[in-house]
Image (cartoon, helix red, strand yellow):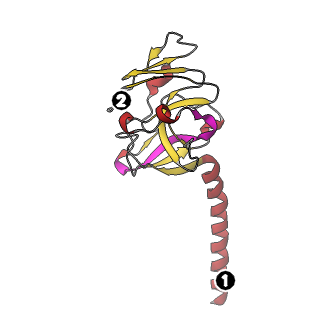
Amino acid sequence: MSENKENFIIETLKFSLIAILIVLPFRIFIAQPFLVSGASMSPNFETGHYLIVDQLSYNFQNPQRGEVIVFRYPQSPKKFFIKRIIGLPNETVILKQQEIIIKNKQNPDGFKLEEPYLKFHSNDNLEMTLSDGEYFTMGDNRPASSDSRSWGVLQEELIIGRAFIRLFPFNQIELFPEYIDDFRKN
């Protein structure tokens, strides 16, 4: 009986070690969980939504307009925020009332950003030109969002990754939640 108990303990330890060796690198380098807290992305992401954040993709491609990202808050890097990318490096973002105009090399006169996912707009007037490695982010619930309008640009090195999977609530499970494909056209 004692030998069976020792074998069980050894096998359990082996299994635990193998599980740690597989799960830990995955968690550190590939994906990590994120629990939404706050109303800044409402109604598309609500408090309690459970996401898996893709940390790997941005090693091979740059963040794109329209992607929902998780990042370290520039003014307190221990805090994590979730927002949508609006402006890309070397673009000018112009906010006029309820419109967003983006100027870049492809569109020197600018284009109006269409945002069909928005239910809440804000009346902002702001112009910001981004440099290399800088992004302009905004929450989907504009009146209740602390974002690039208030604390400035987001440096690329603060980006953790993009929302890859919404796992909870179960009736809203989806890949790349709330990603708007129309953004890639500009």
Q: Measured along the vertical axis of the image, is residue 115 above or below residue 15? A: above
Q: x, y percentage for residue 63?
A: 57, 32
**Residue 67 seen:** no
Question: Position of 122 compared to 102: left or right?
Answer: left
**Residue 64 highlighted magenta (yes or no):** no
Q: x, y percentage for residue 48?
A: 39, 52
* Secondary-structure class at tag 1: helix
Indicate the quadrant where residue 155 lies: top right
The numbered dot on residue 55 is none
Using a 10 Å C-alpha cutoff, classify the residue at mark 1 as few (fewer than 14 neighbours), some (14 to 19) or many (20 or more).
Answer: few
Query: Furthest-bottom residue in view?
Result: 1
Circle 1 residue: 6
Query: Furthest-top residue in view?
Result: 109
Seen from the viewer's position, the closer of residues 72 and 85 is: 72
Q: Main secondary structure of the magenta part?
A: strand
The numbered dot on residue 122 is 2
Amino acid tagged 1:
Glu
Seen from the viewer's position, the closer of residues 136 and 123 is: 123
For the record, the magenta segment spans 153-171
Instruction: Find the distance from the CA under tag 1 to the CA under tag 2.
Output: 65 Å
Q: Say which residue appears at 58% left-offset and 47% top-offset.
A: 77
Q: Measured along the vertical axis of the image, is residue 168 above or below residue 61? A: below
